[in-house]
Amino acid sequence: MKNKNRGWVILVIFQIILIIGLAIMIVLRIDSPSLVPIINHLDSNNFVFYSTKNKTNSLKYFYELSPNIIVKDTLPWLKNITQQTINTDALNESTEYEIKKKDGVFRIITLGDSFTYSPFINTRDNWTELLERKLNDSCKNMKKYEVINLGVSGYDIEYSVQRYMIRGKKYNPDMILYFLKNDDIDIVSEEANDYMHTHLKSGDPISKEIIIQSQEYMKKRIPRPQAIDREINALHKMGEIYSGKIIFFNMFSFDRDIFERLSSFVRQNENLTMITKSQIESPYSNMASSKYSYAPWDYHPNPEGHKEIANSIFNYFLTHNLISCK
């Protein structure tokens, strides 16, 4: 009975963590209009929540999607029920990828939070899948292109780096493509999640006020400059475990202090590239546009937005010779 109760508590904690991650992402984003979004209703049974705390990692609340499941979105503002196919490696993918990379295959790993994971759309129609098909249809200089999606809702940089170590490194990618935003750098997920974990024990109800309190809790424990330092340090760790090409891109706008820190980090390594909103020139950069997002209910991309993201990245690759497409 004790183990059963403990399992229930873990499931509830994870659902709370996911909700706060999505809420923080939307509430703090400077580009977003001041509208109240509807948060995706995700079944906590779809997730694995566990500690990765050891000598080299202090993450207590790291989580991933469970493998071999279907995640369904049935929100009232969606025209149709959408579903994400989670494969045997806990990735939002319509296929299984072999661990050993074959000759002639160019492999890209995508990192990020929900804007990479891609809720509210069928797996086959998200921007990572569209980019993979576009590369294979248009570029014949390689036998095959693979774009493997490691995104998970609510992740900051620390969690994304841990995800890469657990799931991505073994795929031996030729390139990492990271959809990076302000809240991936100035909000430390681990600290906000710590508050929610403590709050759950207190038995208080979860509300909008509690979510805001968790943000304030994090800010009191870690001032903004230190939070940014912590996330940039996680990028340094990424550089220690992966020496290939890493491309950071942002469809929106970075805050000045974040932009300066990230730019400084990128300048230190010739294998790093940062693509800003002005360089991509995508109409999806206006996330409040209902043509490309689910605004006013939610600012994640709709099917047209996913097409724009895939096309924008593909075109940037070609015009800046990041991928040779003959």
Image: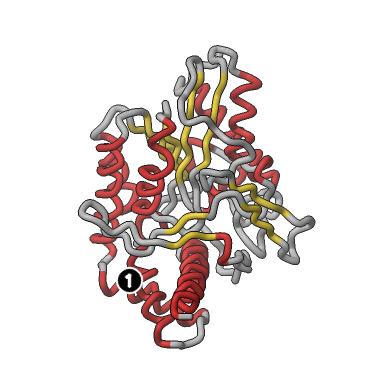
Q: Is residue 189 left or right of residue 58?
A: right
Going by the picture, which residue comes out furthest to the left?
Answer: 55
Residue 187 visible here: no
Going by the picture, which residue comes out furthest to the right?
Answer: 79
**Residue at 54% of width from left, 55% of height from top?**
66
Q: Residue 87's spot in the image, x, y percent? A: 58, 44
**Residue at 58% of width from left, 36% of height from top?**
96
Q: Which residue is more in the foreground, 325 or 289? A: 325
Q: Which residue is more in the foreground, 183 or 288? A: 183
**Residue at 45% of width from left, 65% of height from top?**
28
Q: In this view, does 299 lie above or below 212?
A: above
Q: In this view, does 202 lie to the left or right of 137?
A: left
Judging by the rendered image, the residue that carries numbered circle 1 is 218
Residue 199 visible here: yes
Q: Which residue is more in the foreground, 139 or 171? A: 171
Amino acid bearing label 1? Met
Q: Residue 136's spot in the image, x, y percent? A: 61, 22
Q: Residue 119's spot in the image, x, y percent? A: 61, 54
> How many residues crowd mark 1 within 10 Å: few (<14), some (14–19), many (20+)?
many
Going by the picture, which residue comes out furthest to the front?
Answer: 1
Q: Residue 187's spot in the image, x, y percent? A: 37, 62
Q: Where on the picture, by quarter, is residue 294?
A: bottom right
Q: Is residue 141 above or below residue 241?
A: above
Pick the quarter of the image with the C terminus.
top right
The local secondary structure at tag 1 comes to helix
* Number of numbered tags placed on the structure image: 1
| Display coloring | secondary structure
**Residue at 31% of width from left, 60% of height from top?**
59
Q: Where on the picture, by quarter, is residue 223?
A: bottom left
